[in-house]
Amino acid sequence: MIVNKKWAMAGMGMALISASLSLAAGPAPRHAVRLPRGQTITLWVWQANPIYGEVAKLAQQWAKAHGDTVKIVNQSSNANGFQFYATAARTGKGPDVVFGIPHDNLGTFAEEGLVAPVPKADFKPALYIKPIDAALRIKGTIYSLPDYAQTTALYYNTKMIKTPPKTWAQFTQDANKYGFMYSQHNLYYNYAFIGGMGGFVFKTRNGIENPNVIGLNNRGAVRGFTLMRELDSKYHWMNPSTDYAVATAKFVAGKIGMTIDGPWEIPALKTAKLPFSVAPMPLLPNGRHMTPFLGVITSFVNSRSPNKAADFSLAQALDTPQAQLAYFKLSQQIPAQTSVAKSPLVQKNAVFKAFSAELKYSVPMPNIPQMQTVWTAMSVIADIINGKVSPAVGANDFVKDIKQGIKVLNAG
């Protein structure tokens, strides 16, 4: 799933980690394990600076310690998107290790046999924040290591709004006075409304997602779509053409008081010197919490690599508590490891607290291959918002298009 500049970040500079943080060791990289020396490992990185620079530094440190060579390729601007990995891997021209691809892409890769399962000794679920394990598990198997998590929350201009709204009534009052816009055509941002009103993407049972049971046209989902339409037609905070670029530009320019976004937007706001803060999203009109999507940025190993022991050692070196703290300090990414998330440096950060609060209600993006058909079919949301179809009809169209996409996927 790609959301404009969602995966491109720039940020705040890195300092050495103090021993006083008392971070738990987590799954230790295999520095003590005897590995063949003199290997050449290719690492593709799908995150831009400053994360790319930190990953490159960590990879070269690992290479020096092991007597190996790591060839690093920055794929963050690859116009072919994440599927470029699958194309390359199928032909035997893929990398050995990949860093920076969101977890919801991995189901497609795993089904094709293009990623290697993580050795059980290398992943201990108890070390990670609660939703991580559910996000990564594909039919019971872990295929990647979590580097950091991402979700959305409410950004607000502190010059306009002193106390962020907690209820829908408070939110309505502030939005009427100061303005509110968000990326209303994109399911990634809309799921907070849909899930909170009772909809769902695929039915999940015992951690397994069933693509044959889709909840994007149930009663709750229709209520969610209705509310999304009312943001334009009833509240008039936006018009049907408002998209991610417009909403973000308006907020950065200080022309609206609130928006919904993720941690990737923080560097731009700091550069703009906008007085802002982040808070949990307000309760919905039904009194329930919004349910934003959870994304996990991962590292994984090519199943066709001849150097898997070294590959997993390198992947672990990019996943240590120290590495995760660096990603947090550089661009406010949510640490995946509980020890890092609970460290004093992270806990005293107001922005992190807001995103951390949202994690309690977040829902992992489905990682099965059929999720790609959902992203493709979401264009119907625009028809609901602009009134071309009713929320009920649009929801049914959405599900019909998803089912058709799954039928084509299964036939292929």
Image (tube, helix red, strand yellow):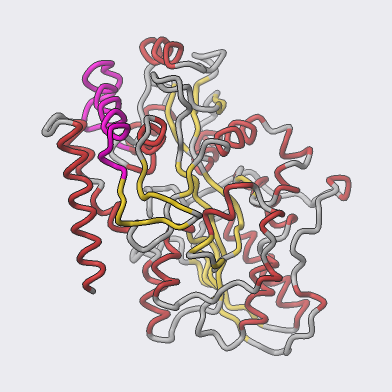
Residue 390, compared with residue 128, is above or below; it is above
Q: Which residue lies furthest to the left in this view?
A: 388
Q: Residue at x 53, y 59 (%)?
A: 136
* Residue 310 percent location from the top left of the image: 67, 80
Quarter holding the N terminus? Answer: bottom left
Highlighted magenta segment, given as a residue range: 215-243
Task: Give 52 or 305, whichever is nearer the viewer.
Answer: 305
Magenta run includes residue 250: no
Q: Which residue is drawn at 54% across and 29% down?
A: 273
* Residue 36 percent location from the top left of the image: 73, 89
* Residue 5 percent location from the top left of the image: 42, 48
**231 sits to left or right of 141:** left
Q: In which quarter of the image is residue 228?
A: top left
Is residue 249 visible from the viewing direction of this image?
no
Q: Residue furthest right?
A: 20
Task: Give 2 or 376, whichever is nearer the viewer.
Answer: 376
* Residue 12 percent location from the top left of the image: 64, 43
Q: Residue at x 50, y 55 (%)?
A: 207
Q: Which residue is drawn at 25% across and 40% down?
A: 217
Quarter holding the C terminus? Answer: bottom left
**90 sits to left or right of 402:** right
Residue 134, compared with residue 144, is above or below; it is above
Q: How many marks?
A: 0
Is residue 48 visible from the viewing direction of this image?
yes
